């Protein structure tokens, strides 16, 4: 079910919600159970449905990462990361320590956040990237489904990234937390 949306009036104040308030609204059934959204600095942002290519790439990444992760790390699929009182994001994939519960994670606890991006590319590379950097997520990948390339963001500092490297579809994606993980988007 797709909820009705509006564009906020520019320059006018809007009411910001907290994670706790949104969770209370969910418990009361204000949102449809299938409705997907994120809380971005207090604003509820509806998320679009996924394309078949998006799902193929995401599922391939999930399979390869699960096989490669050591036991002290777990893989989250669309797991909500509660980064601040007014910010909760749902990356397509996240890698985190098993010793921490999802609701206790902070940005620096997230080893890797990955967005497989099709229709939300500008959002994922823009605002979402800045939020992950602001809250200290150490590494963030945006996989551009249309062009089959990956933007690897590292070295977060004050809401920006110290390094953003583009990996083309023929280049191998790896991550030190998952020693056996090797994937070329051209193979998917």
Image: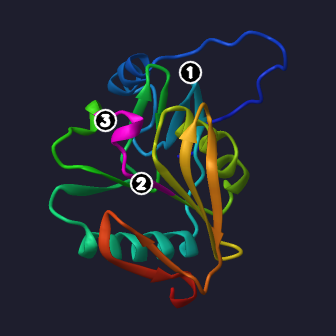
What is the secondary structure assignment of the residue under circle 1? loop
Residue at x 46%, y 69% (from the top left corner): 58
Q: Which residue is mark 3?
A: 105
Q: Residue furthest right?
A: 10
Q: Nearer the viewer, residue 6 or 107?
A: 107
- The answer to whether any part of residue 143 appears in the image is yes
Q: Is residue 47 above or below residue 27?
A: below
Q: Which residue is mark 2?
A: 112
Image quadrant where residue 99 sits: top left
- Residue 181 appears at what percent x and percent y? 35, 76
Q: State the extent of the magenta-drawn residues as a range.
A: 105-114
Q: Nearer the viewer, residue 106 or 7?
A: 106
Q: Nearer the viewer, residue 92 or 183?
A: 183
- Residue 42 is labelled as 1
Residue at x 44%, y 37% (from the top left corner): 32
Residue at x 30%, y 73% (from the top left corner): 179
Separation of marks 2 and 3 at Cα, in angstroms: 12 Å
Q: Which mark lies nearer to you, 3 or 1?
A: 3
Q: Are marks 2 and 3 in contact (CB under 8 Å)?
A: no
């Amino acid at each position: 079910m797709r909820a009705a949306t509006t564009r906020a009036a520019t320059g006018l104040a809007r009411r910001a919600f907290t994670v706790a308030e949104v969770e209370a609204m969910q418990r009361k059934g204000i949102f449809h159970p299938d409705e997907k959204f994120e809380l971005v600095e207090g604003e509820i942002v509806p998320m679009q449905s996924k394309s078949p290519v998006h799902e193929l790439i995401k599922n391939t990444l999930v399979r390869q990462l699960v096989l490669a992760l050591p036991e002290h790390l777990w893989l989250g699929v669309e797991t909500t990361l509660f980064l601040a009182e007014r910010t909760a994001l749902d990356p397509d994939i996240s890698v985190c320590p098993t010793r921490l519960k999802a609701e206790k994670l902070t940005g620096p606890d997230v080893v890797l956040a990955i967005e497989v991006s099709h229709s939300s590319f500008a959002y994922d590379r823009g605002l979402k990237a800045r939020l992950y950097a602001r809250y200290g997520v150490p590494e963030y990948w945006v996989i551009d489904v249309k062009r089959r390339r990956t933007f690897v963001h590292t070295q977060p500092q004050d809401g920006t990234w110290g390094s953003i490297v583009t990996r083309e579809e023929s280049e191998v994606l790896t991550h030190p937390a998952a020693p056996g993980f090797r994937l070329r988007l051209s193979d998917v």
